[in-house]
Structures are given as C-alpha cells and as structure tokens.
Amino acid sequence: MKLSIVVLALAASAYASVVARVEGEVTVAASAKWLSIEEGISYKNGSTVSLAPRAGTEVVHCYGTGTKADRAPIISVIDDWCGRVFGTTVNNGQTIWARYDYGTFTILVSAEAINGCSWVVDGNCNRLLRLPTDRCNTNGENGKQGGFETDLCGQWRMDPGCCGSDF
C-alpha cells in the first residue's frame, strides 16, 4: 500500500529565468526563483520501527544525464527544504520529498529511510543533499544533473527536471 500526501505552496515574489536546450538537455540559470513547491510523504507500508542511529559508508550515485541546473538554485532548494523538514521523523520505508517548480524546470529533493532504520532529520540534511550536487558533474560549479547518496539507513536524492518530468 502506498499513501501520498501533497501540499502546494506558492512563492510571493517568484520569477523564472531563461532555459537553453543543448543537445536534448536543459541548462538552468542561477538567478531563477521557484514558483511553487509540492511536498509529500510516501509510505511503502504501515509499519514503524524504533529509532536507530544512521551509520555506514556514504556512497554517491550520479545520474550523468538529464536536465542540467546551476548550483545556486539547487543549494537554495536544499537549504529551504532542509529547514522545512528539520525534526521530522522518517520511518523505515517512508520517503519525504518536495519538488520545487521554477516554471521552466523543477528540482526534486527527497530522503528515504531504508534497511529497517528510522531517524529524525537533522543538520546532516543539507550536507547529504549537497553530496550528489558537489560530487557529480565536477567539471564546473554549474551543469548539475543530480544523483543520490545512500548510506546504511538512508537515501538522499537531488534531481533537476524539466517539462513535467524529474529527468
């Protein structure tokens, strides 16, 4: 059974920047401001487990394809979302997420509790979502295509998208 809860929030002073299409990929300018946010919590099943500390090696997986975005709007999204979910308990099999809509592109961020673990979102949120941002597409500060970090108890995803897709 999968349950999703979605909330939509609008930014008061939002604008979008020009998007250029390069060989089927989208490049996003750094000055873009998000227009709206979709947020949700998804449950793989109804069970919960007691809280356990996160541990294990942090492994970063890079997408290396899809929409490209500048680092500045990605960091803005990470900082905003981590501030919103700080203190949230994430139970085993549960994913919390948000998709920030800039009009011409989106940035999806999420955190999932895996391997029987449950935990509370803390200051590591920003650090863990920056791992796929800064360790992928390392030829420059911009042109980030996203990826995810996986450790023993969690998976943290950052994914720019375009045209109604997270790709």
Image (cartoon, grey):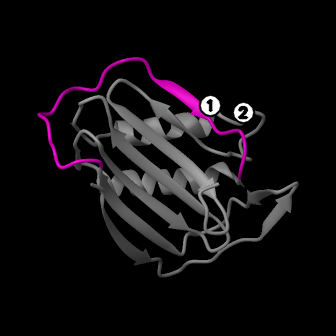
Pick the residue in front: 2 or 129: 2
- Whether pointer 2 and pointer 1 mark residues with C-beta atoms closer than 8 Å, the reply is yes
Q: Residues within 10 Å of mark 1 (few under 14, many from 20)?
A: some
Relative to 76, residue 50 above or below: above
Residue shown at 65%/34% (left/top)? 136
Q: Residue at x 65, y 65 (%)?
A: 105
- Residue 148's place in the image compared with 18, above or below, is above
Q: Residue at x 15, y 33 (%)?
A: 51
- In the orientation shown, which residue stands out farthest toward the front? 1
Residue corresponding to mark 1 = 135
Residue placed under numbered mark 2 in the picture: 138
Give residue 75's position: percent from left, percent from top: 54, 50
Mark seen at residue 17: none
Q: Give the residues in magenta.
A: 44-66
Residue 36, horizontal then vertical, whole percent: 49, 74
Asked whether 103 or 32 is in front, the reply is 103
Q: Secondary structure at mark 2?
A: loop
Q: Circle 2: is it few (<14), some (14-19), or many (20+) Cα within 10 Å?
A: few
Give the alpha-carbon distance from disc 2 to disc 1, as whole Å. 6 Å
What residue sits 29% from the left and 48% below the top? Answer: 44
| Frontmost residue, 135 versus 113 | 113
Q: Is residue 33 left or right of residue 31?
A: left
Count the numbered circles shown: 2
The C terminus: image quadrant: bottom right
Tell me: 125 left or right of 36. left
Q: Quadrant of residue 115?
A: top left
Provide the major secondary structure of the magenta segment.
loop
- Verify whether residue 82 appears in magenta: no
Q: Secondary structure at mark 1?
A: helix
